[in-house]
Image (spheres, rainbow, N blue to C red):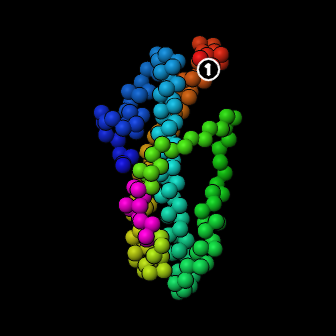
Amino acid sequence: MSVEVVPGGQRRIDRVLDPAFVEGVDQLGLPELRARREEAEAEEADVSYLRRLLQGRLDILRAELVRRSATDEQDVAGLLAGLPAILSDDSPGTFSAVPRVQVPSRAGEHRRRVERLVSDETIARLPELDVEELTRAVEVLSAEEEKVSTHRRTVQRVVDVLRGELARRYRDGTAQVSQLLE
């Protein structure tokens, strides 16, 4: 499973990031516009989930590198005790008047993808890994997280275009809130 876009591809990410997906949105019927927005939002949920999986592993590995630079101790008890703080998301979130929680549709595929890069076994074997192996794992995950983040921002721009068109229609009266119930 890759987030690399394949022109003319059949995967959802290929469709959503095809420039034709948002061309002429002002000419689309309301049902088609909503369907495209939902498809783009679902892709954004999947790419965000993949990104968070990568970031979680990166956070753990980086914390272990920092811990090791402060002490020669191989025991990971301190790392385990700090996992709640390491994995917490302290960054300020964005506010949405209508929050939507989307469950990723391809969670299993994303988990397997991350495991191919850095397996669960790597995390389980932290005490046995040397600094060089940890550093290499961080580099691999960092490069992948950067690619995924770039694609996520691109998908978010598509979502913004589609949401913006819907908002414009409600604002200028060409779409009615009552149509939401249809």
Q: Residue at x 59, y 17 (%)?
A: 182
Q: Secondary structure at mark 1?
A: helix
**Residue situated in front as seen by the camera: 25 or 127:** 127
Which quadrant of the structure image shows residue 134? bottom left
Tell whether 89 sits left or right of 14.
right
Tell whether 125 sits left or right of 170.
left
Give the amino acid type for the residue marked by disc 1 in the picture: Leu
Q: Position of residue 137 (x, y in %)?
A: 41, 68
Which quadrant of the structure image shows residue 14? top left
In the image, which residues are magenta?
112-122
Q: Residue at x 35, y 41 (%)?
A: 5
Tell whether 132 sits left or right of 168.
left
According to the picture, the residue beneath numbered tag 1 turns out to be: 180
Query: Is residue 58 among what the camera can see?
Result: yes
**Residue situated in front as seen by the camera: 152 or 126:** 126
- Rendered position, 105 above or below 57: above
Q: Residue at x 65, y 44 (%)?
A: 94
The total number of labels drawn is 1
